[in-house]
Image (cartoon, grey):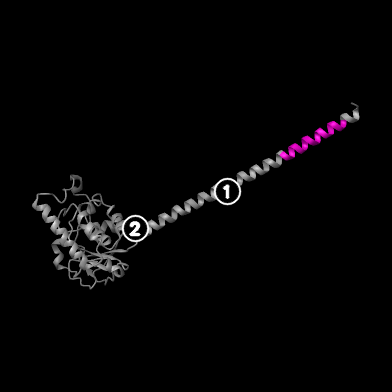
């Protein structure tokens, strides 16, 4: 092989090597581009997932605060034990003055009919409880056509545990929400109290019957059925509920 042929072979090999490097560089560029595309896709997918999670959280928060809650405060209760005051601190409830003419449902012993799902129009304007001492309840003169009664159930709060009708503010509101088909929100506000989850457990038989009721008339029938069941239990010596633990009866416990 002469010098000319050697030179041509060397030149060709050098050109091939240069072309190979260019091709490798091009492939590396494609690979980097593909990796960048994959990374962008993963990033977008993560952003979309986070957006969906946030939307679900927002929707849940909206459900848990669907019905606005209020309390007419007569200033008669122990501030440290008042469940309404605790709800106010958690921004679950707004306190209003007795002179305010509330337009939604008012839970009151002076009501003429039971609160039910047929009160949906009033429900959209909110639920309001009258916060006063049970010892002075007869002194309350608040009058409204929107006052509603609650059917038979027992209190679970440590102060009046097991007593018929003597519910705390949070229990009365939770019961109203449940009777109007808003059980999730009812469970949520009760979760702020250590004893709260026991309210629907102890009153389970009653609310199982009430859950199917659409109006005042159906609730009255369901209530009679529940009372008959409770009477049979009492006649046979069965307990309808258990007493709370000593920790629930701590004087410092907010009720």
Name the spot of residue 105 as percent of width and height, x first.
26, 68
Q: Residue at x 14, y 68 (%)?
A: 139
Give residue 16's position: percent from left, percent from top.
79, 36
The residue under label 2 is: 64
Q: Quadrant of residue 54?
A: bottom left
Viewer-side residue, 138 vs 188: 188
Pick the front one: 130 or 109: 109
Q: Residue at left 71%, top 38%?
A: 24
Label at residue 123: none
Q: Which residues are magenta?
A: 7-23
| Helix, strand or loop: magenta stretch | helix
Task: Give the distance between the C-alpha atoms of the residues marked 1 and 2, in whole angstroms.
Answer: 36 Å
Q: Nearer the viewer, residue 42 or 210?
A: 210
Of all residues, the one furthest to the left in this rendering is 235
Q: Residues within 10 Å of mark 1 (few under 14, many from 20)?
A: few
In this rendering, position of residue 69 left or right of residue 60: left
Query: In the structure shown, which secondary structural element does the residue marked by tag 1 occupy?
Result: helix
Is residue 255 at all visible to an observer of this figure?
no
* Residue 68 drawn at (x, y percent): 32, 64
Q: Quadrant of the C terminus?
A: bottom left
* Residue 90 in the image: above or below residue 122: above
Q: Is residue 52 left or right of residue 214?
A: right
Q: Secondary structure at mark 2?
A: helix
Residue holding disc 1: 40
**Rendered image quadrant of residue 190:** bottom left
């Amino acid at each position: 092989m002469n010098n000319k042929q050697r030179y041509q072979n060397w030149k060709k090999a050098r050109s091939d090597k240069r072309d190979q490097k260019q091709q490798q560089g091009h492939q590396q560029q494609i690979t980097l581009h593909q990796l960048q595309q994959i990374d962008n896709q993963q990033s977008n997918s993560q952003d979309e997932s986070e957006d969906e999670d946030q939307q679900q959280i927002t929707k849940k928060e909206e459900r848990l605060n669907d019905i606005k809650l209020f309390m007419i405060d007569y200033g008669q209760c122990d501030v440290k034990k008042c469940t309404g005051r605790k709800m106010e601190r958690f921004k679950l409830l707004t306190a209003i003055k007795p002179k305010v003419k509330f337009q939604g449902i008012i839970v009151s012993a002076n009501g003429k009919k039971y609160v039910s799902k047929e009160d949906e129009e009033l429900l959209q304007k909110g639920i309001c409880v009258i916060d006063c001492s049970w010892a002075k309840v007869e002194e309350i003169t608040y009058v409204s056509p929107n006052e509603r009664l609650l059917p038979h159930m027992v209190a679970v709060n440590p102060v009046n545990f097991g007593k018929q009708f003597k519910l705390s503010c949070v229990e009365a509101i939770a019961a109203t929400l449940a009777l109007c088909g808003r059980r999730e929100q009812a469970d949520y506000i009760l979760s702020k109290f250590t004893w709260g989850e026991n309210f629907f457990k102890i009153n389970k038989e009653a609310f199982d019957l009430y859950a199917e009721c659409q109006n005042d008339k159906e609730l009255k029938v369901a209530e009679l059925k529940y009372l008959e069941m409770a009477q049979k239990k009492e006649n046979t010596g069965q307990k309808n509920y258990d007493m709370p633990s000593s920790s629930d009866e701590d004087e410092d416990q907010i009720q």
